Image: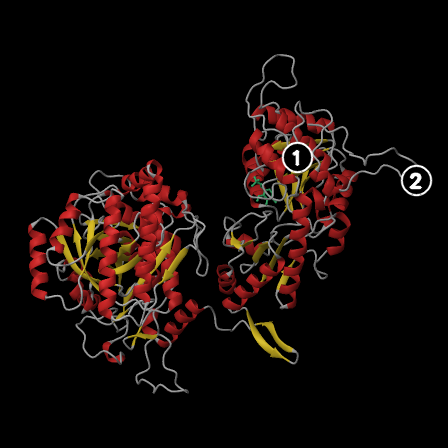
Amino acid sequence: MSAPNIDLPTPGPESPRAPRKPYRFATLCATVENPDMKDQYSASSVPIYQTATFKGVSGQYDYTRSGNPTRSHLEHHLAKMSSAEHAFAVSSGMAAMDVITRVLKPGDEVIAGDDLYGGTNRLLSFLKSHGGVIVHHVDTTNDESIIPYVKAGKTAMVMLESPTNPLLKIADLAKISALVKERAPEVIIVVDNTMMSPYLQKPLEHGADIVYDSATKYLSGHHDLMAGVITCNRDDLAKQMAFTINSVGNGLSPFDSFLLLRGTKTLAVRMDRQQSSAMAVATMLDRLGFTVHYPGLKNHPRREVHERIASGAGAVLSFETGDKALSERIVGATRLWGISVSFGCVNSLISMPCVMSHASIDAATRAERGLPEDLIRLCVGIEDTDDLLDDLEHALLEAGAITLEQGVDGHHYVRASLKREGHAISRAVEKLALSEPESRHKDEREWFVSAPGKVILFGEHAVVHGVTALAASVDLRCYGLTTPRKDNKISVHFTDLADYRHEWNIDELPWDAVTYTPPGTNHPDTLDPKLIEAISTQALPLSIHDSPTARNAALTFLYLYMTLAGDVRPAIHFSARGTLPVGAGLGSSASFSSCAASALLLVLKRVSVPPRPAPTVPPIGPEHPGHVHVSHQGRRALPSDVAEEINRWAFVAEKVLHGNPSGVDNCVSVFGGALAYTRPGFGKKSGMDPIHGFKSLRFLLVDTKVPRNTKALVAGVALKKQNEPEYVEGLLEAIQTISDEARRILADPDLPRREQLKGLESLINENHAHLRDLGVSHPALEAVKSKTASYNLQTKLTGAGGGGCAVTLVPDGFSEDQLKQLINELRADGFEPYLTSVGGSGVGVLSPHAASDEPHVTAYALPVTPPETPGVREDVAQASSLRSVFENAASNDFATWAEQRGRWLPNIKSGT
Ligand code: PLP
């Protein structure tokens, strides 16, 4: 689209005293005006012409591939903003480059920078291999380096980028253009201006023939669309490119044109804010002594060149920490800075190019190009500058990159020496490595872990509509065991899931599809569909013989293993089995997820248990405050940062299993105890709060064995709410009151136990009645309720209802004989009762330390895991391995067997 009238002069008659001036850039951005395309209704916002075709034969438009009014408006606007004669909007930045490079012919030579965007390199390589184009890569930060390659009649194009990403190297666009044109005037100079946008740099004014932007970045500004923009002043080139766009059909769609037009209106204000914050961030990092790459800093190489060509330093910067692991910890410790590739968005982003955007370039080439492995890239958004600085400072501190020191004029942050203590999790790993020589023989180690299921005590169903639910861990658990293998395979065995077994050659797993998540960084919120697809099709081809639950569990295990393993890839066997029923609404999948996550994190040394205690327990006193982790009947528990890390990965595993879990099951399974959960989105305070002081309670859990359809039950309640809003709202309010009251009772340390139990019993009855009124009970559940009532015990359904499980509170002092009798009667009625306690430990790890080192425990049933002697003989290792007993022990006393294996390190946040 051409924009013959690119000036939009100030109104009013021109006079010698007050000449009409073009508007400044911010005004141009905000003012979308095209005198040639007046809207028939004077719409203030350009409408979306969402149409493929146009009627008639003589109109300006006939077919959207060739032209569309929304796109025309956008292109006119972009031409105006770029002070260009022609502008084209296409479907991505790479599509823009594709359109541009189609002017090349076989045999043409291209000179390109050696530090270009990876996608640019990829397309150039393709042109080389498929289009007969010859490509020379040169260092464009040295103006003269191009000269030897410029050959009149041969060189067709020069491709430049300045500043480069992520090292912000500067090319003198004006000087290079002039040098090239002097020698070969026909050469087309192309500049990728994405890092600057037309606001900060207009290469057409410095000799470039074609400029393109990935409009996915600053021009759009919101990371909600992909687009590319091409601008140029030469009619001949514009004609060729218009031909290509019409021929291949990559012009921007009407809807994306509308979105991009909207984004461009705020380009100047966004960039002003982003740039000033970027300067503040760069200054802070520079002051702390890091090597910072940002053209706004005084000492940035060729800063004067940049200032001559551009009118700002932009909002991308990078810095080096001197230590890759430290950088990973910093990236993982930020909260406001999202870990993501790309830039130009209103939100601030942080990344490690060598691990993320540039990971496809091999390490040797990265090193050759001087791309430091520890480099952190920051793409600054529009958030409050102080919040961004605070968050980064906090991350630097947490990662151990800076420390707070006392100076003469108060406290200051200073850069820590590189031999500082690291992040708590890594510190724990380091400590373990130092204190336990045998831990280096990680292949000798078996890890035995366990995690509980959950019951919803109050508020099920109502929770979907914003009411608080209370959930607690249940003492029915999933157990996981990893055993090292001596070959290059990994395998799984799920005894309870139709005895499912599978093994894989590690090298044959689809590693190409995986994005490694280094320690200290978090898995993105959403799963990687590419990896799921690759595992499902390549490693787990569908078999009618496999139980879908087992196959899902295997998929989950592989997803976690591959995402966490990096280059370590140990050969292991993982067995899981449980004492809780699968699919009965008791959180079996969350407990499996917690086991898989904790076992893998331990095997891969991404978390560790506390080091072996000192042989004698020091007296507790002011000088000997005791051990920080002593919390569970005087025994050690898992450190909270380890539990947090397990929780994060268990949630990833839950997502693989369930798609979109709420996270309640997960938190209960990892942290144990009880918690109150309120869904976000109802205008109330949402989130998960541990109920501190929750005392363990005894429950009889009865599985009716009636299968349920949770989705249908939830939908049924929603329908009822729609049909009888007042009635259902009343029930929901009543359930909220029950939850509040139960929470108060459970957390009140002064309430006598008897009163607590009585209070809970009446709330159980009330809550069940409301659930029945919501239509989610079932005759089997009512049968359990009346049977238990005949023993004077109170029961409610738990979870989705419609079958599944019921919970019966067993008060202290209830006759054991009566309980036995009740259990027998329930069994005789075809139900499966489990006597259990709720509110106990979350994830547990069997202590790897020998019995004699544990001051609080006197006797163990052997064997202990792992074998304490490094380098044990194969047969000895086999004999001391837990695996065969683990897989073969009888189900009914598995929990007791597991309990007796040694000292379990529990995780208790809110429980006993
Ligand atoms: N040029 C640069 C400098 C980029 O950073 C990118 C994308 O990251 C592109 C071009 C490609 O743009 P797109 O992703 O919109 O195709």
Disc 2: which residue: 17
Please state which amino acid type lies under the numbered disc 2: Arg
Answer left or right for 620 relative to 419: left
What colouring style does the render use? secondary structure
Disc 2 packing (10 Å; few <14; some 14–19; many ≥20)? few
Query: Image height check: is 633 above or below 715?
Result: below
Decide if residue 421 is on the left or right side of residue 561. Answer: right
Check the image and report above or below for 156 versus 552: above
Name the spot of residue 60 as percent of width and height, x first: 66, 18
Q: In the picture, which quadrant includes the N terminus?
A: top right
Q: Position of residue 765 (x, y in %)?
A: 22, 54
- Looking at the image, tell me whether mark 1 or mark 2 is earlier in sequence order: 2
> Which is nearer the eye, 362 or 673?
673
Q: Which mark is residue 230?
A: 1
x%, y% of residue 706? 17, 44
Answer left or right for 510 relative to 493: right
The residue lying toward the viewer, choosing from 201 and 910, is 910
Instruction: Look at 35% across and 72% down and name the residue there.
Output: 610
The type of residue carrying mark 1 is Ile
Q: Residue furthest right?
A: 16
Image location of residue 583, percent across then percent down: 23, 48
Q: Is residue 599 visible?
A: no
Q: Nearer the viewer, residue 485 or 671?
A: 671
Q: Label 2's element?
A: loop
- From what the image shows, is residue 408 above or below residue 508? below
In terms of image quadrants, where is residue 210?
A: top right
Q: Tag on residue 887?
A: none
